[in-house]
Image (cartoon, rainbow, N blue to C red):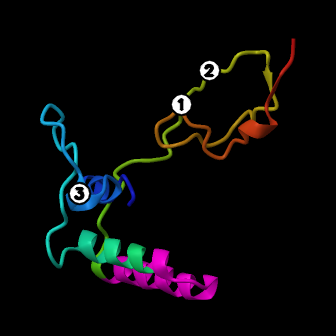
Amino acid sequence: MNRYMFPLEGKWWSKGKDSCKADPNIPYDCGVKPEPGSPAEKLQALYEKGLATKSVEDRHKVVWEAIDFIIEEGPFVIGISGDQQMPVVINKKLRNVLDYGVVGPWAPCTPGNQVPAQWFCEE
């Protein structure tokens, strides 16, 4: 389950649902069980349906069910900012990094549309 959309419900699912044994010292260690009939419960059911679906074509249909649900019932997440210019510090030995580009949402710790596999160090 996406960590940005319904993060506590996603944590509940990923930690074993009702079988999770919470550490009492960690708040929401097992996440939160989705409310019956909630969007999180419906999307988790579609995710499980997709996992149980054998053929690729049928899994694509399940994905489209989820997309249609999000379009019809959502939005569940609204971005509040974006496209801010921000300097990114790069060591002068690191080469093949674009001079201008988009870094990820938690800039500058993610490369966004950069291609780190093509970077190299030059002594």
Q: Which element is circle 1 on?
A: loop
Q: The disc labelled 3 sits on which kind of residue?
A: Ser
Q: Residue furthest right?
A: 123
Q: Which residue is mark 1?
A: 108
Q: Which element is circle 2 on?
A: loop
Nearer the N terminus, badge 3 or badge 1?
3
Query: What span is colored magenta in the figure?
Result: 50-72
Q: The disc labelled 2 sits on which kind of residue?
A: Val
Q: Is residue 9 visible?
A: no
Q: Is residue 70 visible?
A: yes
Q: Which element is circle 3 on?
A: helix
**42 lies above or below 103:** below
User: Rounded to the nearest whole Å, what is the CA distance between mark 3 and mark 2?
Assistant: 45 Å
Q: Report the quarter where the C terminus lies.
A: top right
Q: Which residue is nearer to you in this view: 76 or 101?
A: 76
Q: Residue 13 got which mark?
A: none
Q: Position of residue 84 (x, y in %)?
A: 48, 40
**112 lies above or below 90:** below
The local crowd at label 3, few if under 14, some if 14 to 19, many if 20 or more residues have their Cα within 10 Å, is few
Q: Which residue is mark 2?
A: 89
Q: Which residue is mark 3?
A: 19
Residue at image position (19%, 74%) is: 38
Q: Report the quarter where the N terminus lies.
A: bottom left
**33 lies above or below 45:** above
Mark 2 and 1 residues: CB-CB less than 8 Å, in contact? yes
Q: Quadrant of residue 93?
A: top right
